[in-house]
Amino acid sequence: MENLRDKKLNLPDCKFGFYRPILPYLIIAFGVAVRLVEYLSNRSLWADEAVLALNIVNRSYLELLQPLDYDQGAQIGFLMVEKFAVQILGNNEYALRLFPFICGVGSLFLFYELGKKWLLKSGVTISLLLFACLKYLVYYSAEVKQYSSDVTITILLYLLPLAKQKLNRGQMIKYCLVGAIAI
C-alpha cells in the first residue's frame, strides 16, 4: 500500500509554516495531560459504570464469561483485564479506570502513527490535535467502560496491515482472524 506522501500530488505540505517537527509530540503531551486530569479527578462512578463495576468486582473470571447482570455487555478481554486490575490494585475507581486510561493514552500514539502513514504532515498535526482534544475520547479514557479500548484496538487493527507493503493470502486471513477476535 502506498501512503499519500509517496504520491506526487504537487500540494504544498506546510504552506503557511503550520508544521513543526516537535508539534505532534507537544499535542500528544497535551492529550496525555488532559486525560490524566480527567483520570485523577476521581469522580464517582455513574449508574452504567457502577453496574459494570459490580459485575467485575463480584464475579470470578469464569463467571465473567456468562451474560452480565444489569443489562451490561463488554468484551471478554476488557472484563478480564479489569478483574485483574481490581485484584492487583484493589477495589477502587482508580483501579477500575486504569486500563481505559492506558488505552486512551496509547491511542494518541497509535493515531499519530496512523496519520503519518496516510496524511500530509500538516494534516497529521490537525487531525492529531482534534483527536487529542475530542471531548468524548478524553471522557471515556477515564470511565469504567470499554470505549477507549475499542478506539485503541481499532486504530491498531488499521495499523497492522500497513506494516507490510504487500499482503499475501495467508497474511490477509491472519489479519481477518485478529480482527474477528478483537471484536
Image (cartoon, grey):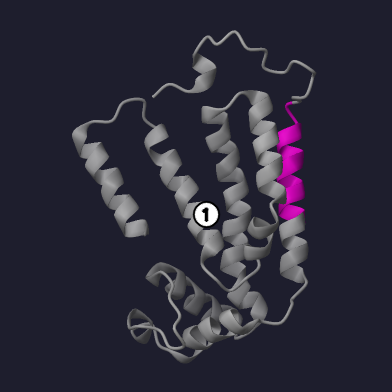
Q: Which residue is mark 1?
A: 151
State left or right for residue 173 relative to residue 13: left
Please give the range of residues in magenta.
21-33
Picture quarter containing residue 49?
A: bottom right
Nearer to me, 154 or 72: 72
Q: Quadrant of the C terminus?
A: bottom left
Q: Quadrant of the N terminus?
A: top left
* Residue 127 pos. (x, y %): 65, 37
Picture quarter containing residue 98?
A: bottom right
The structure residue drawn at horizontal position 55% and vertical position 44%, both measured from the top left corner, is 110
State left or right for residue 144 relative to residue 32: left
Magenta-drawn stretch, dominant element (helix, strand or loop)? helix
Image vertical order of residue 5 relative to residue 179, above or below: above
The structure residue drawn at horizontal position 61% and vertical position 84%, both measured from the top left corner, is 47
Q: Is residue 139 magenta?
A: no
* Residue 174 pos. (x, y %): 26, 45
Q: Residue furthest front?
A: 71
State left or right for residue 93 relative to residue 17: left
The structure residue drawn at horizontal position 46% and vertical position 69%, both measured from the top left corner, is 78
Identity, as a three-letter code, of the amino acid under mark 1: Val
Image vertical order of residue 120 relative to residue 91, above or below: above
Nearer to me, 136 or 108: 136
The structure residue drawn at horizontal position 70% and vertical position 57%, both measured from the top left corner, is 135
State left or right for residue 32 relative to residue 90: right
Picture quarter containing residue 119?
A: top right
* Residue 180 pos. (x, y %): 30, 55
